[in-house]
Image (tube, rainbow, N blue to C red):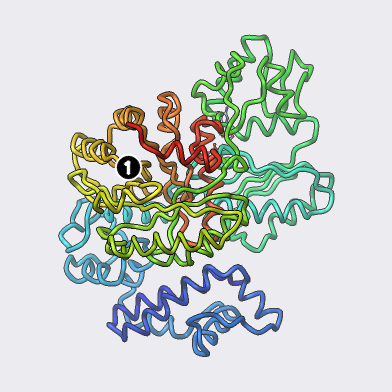
Amino acid sequence: MPVHNAEIASVFREIADLLDLEQANPFRIRAYRNAARTVEELATDLAELIAAGKELPRLPGIGADLAGKIREIATTGHCATLDQLRKAEPPGLVEFLTLPGLGPKRAKAIYDELGVHTLNQLHRAAKDHRLRQVAGLGEATERRIIEAIEARAGKPVRHKLSVAAKIADSLVALLRGAPGVRTVEVAGSYRRSKETVGDLDILVGADKVNEVMDRFTRYDEVAEVMARGPTRATVMLRSGMQVDLRLVPDEVFGAALVYFTGSKAHNIAIRRRAQERGLKISEYGVFRGTRRIAGSTEEQVYRAIGLPWIAPELREDQGEIAAAEAGALPVLVKLADLAGDLHCHSRATDGHNTIREMAEAARAIGLSYIAMTEHSRHLTVAHGLDPRRLLRQIDEIDRLNENLSGITILKGIEVDILEDGRLDLPDDVLGRLDLVVGAVHSAFNLSRERQTKRVLLAMDHPHFTILAHPSGRLIPERQPFDLDMAAVVRHAKARGCFLELNAHPDRLDLLDTHCRMAKEAGVLVAISSDAHRTFDFANLRFGVGQARRGWLERDDVLNTRPLARLRTLLKRTM
Ligand code: DGT
Ligand code: CA
Ligand code: CA
């Protein structure tokens, strides 16, 4: 079985963790961690290069020793160093290290201090809130550990949309390449752009059914073929993603696509509507008696029950059927509608590229402006900017703007909203910026009342423009914090501020329901990448998907405006 970069990276990570347990040389540990990141982010498959007898590319931080290990892992699937290190530690502890969110120090503390020696004991200890007795461990880690252990025990797991997208993209490419294939559509929650996906549901229209089935079940990421029939198959991929594939005849492709796109609630609602009209609707078509009156396209299916086509992102039985009936469906915002991006970082703080590189990458995907919004000093882990460094960056941006064509860099900041609602930088500095994106990065556990007051106070600040990732959630590990979003939306309207929809796949925050609240209140939403490297602009697609789930149209989105219009909107009048 071929080894992929992600697996090489995870071997390196485990080695680093085990070396850390042994209190080995920190430089050696860091070298493994950096190598893991480098390998993981590489676009080319290293095992493939090696199998093809090619030289490994020269990679930063990967010398002869690590290159040798890459070879060893890629060709044998094992790593002698790792095996040795594993033998030196108790097996329970080695297992703890494979859980997300449990680093070596904490794992060892749990093992030694709490006398917790197996995964079962760890699960119990987390449920009983005993892990908190270890310094640095809190409720969030306990919850994450419980989730990870339960996921392993076969309980359902959900995958981030970005993870699902990578898998879906490769599967679509694989299947489109099969002989006789006419159509491939990924349906289900993925097509509805839900922030997490339980499994992928793929529909294929093709002549040569067996060839498609073979190609699918022999895909090299398949860990197990769970079921295979003449027209459907289910596989488990090595990533833990389950994929259902169905071969569907052309005459009913549209009906199957509607059915398997869901949501279940939407399906039930349209079935009821069909029944009211004396029709039957199923994955095989819309029927009057035994006669099929629609099936080949989605448009036909909806038309047969008296509705215009409804975009997948709206299919949640949240009013879309009434809106369709009334001819009042929104014309949803599209990726191509975005004119710019109002939140990104550079190497000056925790980003990985220069400002110029970020600007050029944004221009390359068709944007005409970006705002640099580095972290502010309070966020020390990100090396946040103090006034002096921010002023220097302002000058740098002025110089860059003189030299760049086709893209304008706006001057901004992602300023921390402190616990009392003050902003983390002085007024005179903030006043020199084109926009101020304010963010909560600390004290997530305040009461609803205090958290809300904190955010409203920040918005009162005359220079405040956009509230970044309003709920603070991180998928899957951090729930939204307690905030009265209706009050925030009202206040944004009153103060002339905007709300961000952070497109990072770990955030997708503004939540869809809150997008709708903003739209109804007339508060514009900024769909922002929060890019930390040039290729992060690609995440905008997930932000747009989420905005569409929130019924947003082009005019509901701040950064669809051309630059001149945007500048007017950014000037606070209230
Ligand atoms: P997921 O996979 O949990 O993220 O969510 P979905 O929506 O992809 O759900 P999944 O994979 O279980 O099924 C795909 C679609 O098939 C679902 O959105 C609607 C349809 N479907 C599945 N089960 C039922 C059902 O019992 N009744 C109806 N009406 N539709 C169903
Ligand atoms: Ca699904
Ligand atoms: Ca499914």
Q: Is mark 1 on a helix, strand or loop?
A: loop
Image coordinates of residue 5 in percent, x first then y, are 56, 71
Residue at image location 67% in from the left, 45% down from the top: 245
Question: Could you tell me which quadrant the N terminus lies in?
Answer: bottom right
Q: Is residue 321 above or below residue 491?
A: above
Q: Circle 1 is placed at which residue position? A: 464
The C terminus lies in which quarter of the figure? top left
Q: Which quadrant of the structure image shows residue 59?
A: bottom right
Local packing at callout 1 (Cα closer than 10 Å; few below 14, some 14-19, many 20+) is many
Which quadrant would residue 458 be assigned to in this image?
A: top left
State the image coordinates of residue 3 (x, y, percent, origin top left).
59, 72
Q: Which of 37 and 157 is in front in this view?
A: 37
Question: Can see residue 284?
Answer: yes
Residue type at numbered disc 1: Phe
Is residue 523 shown above or below 354? above
Q: Where is residue 434 in the image (x, y as percent from the top left)?
A: 40, 48
Observer able to see residue 1: no
How many numbered marks, from 0 up?
1
Q: Can you say whether 128 is above or below 480 in the image?
A: below
Residue at horizontal 77 percent and vertical 16 percent from the top: 290
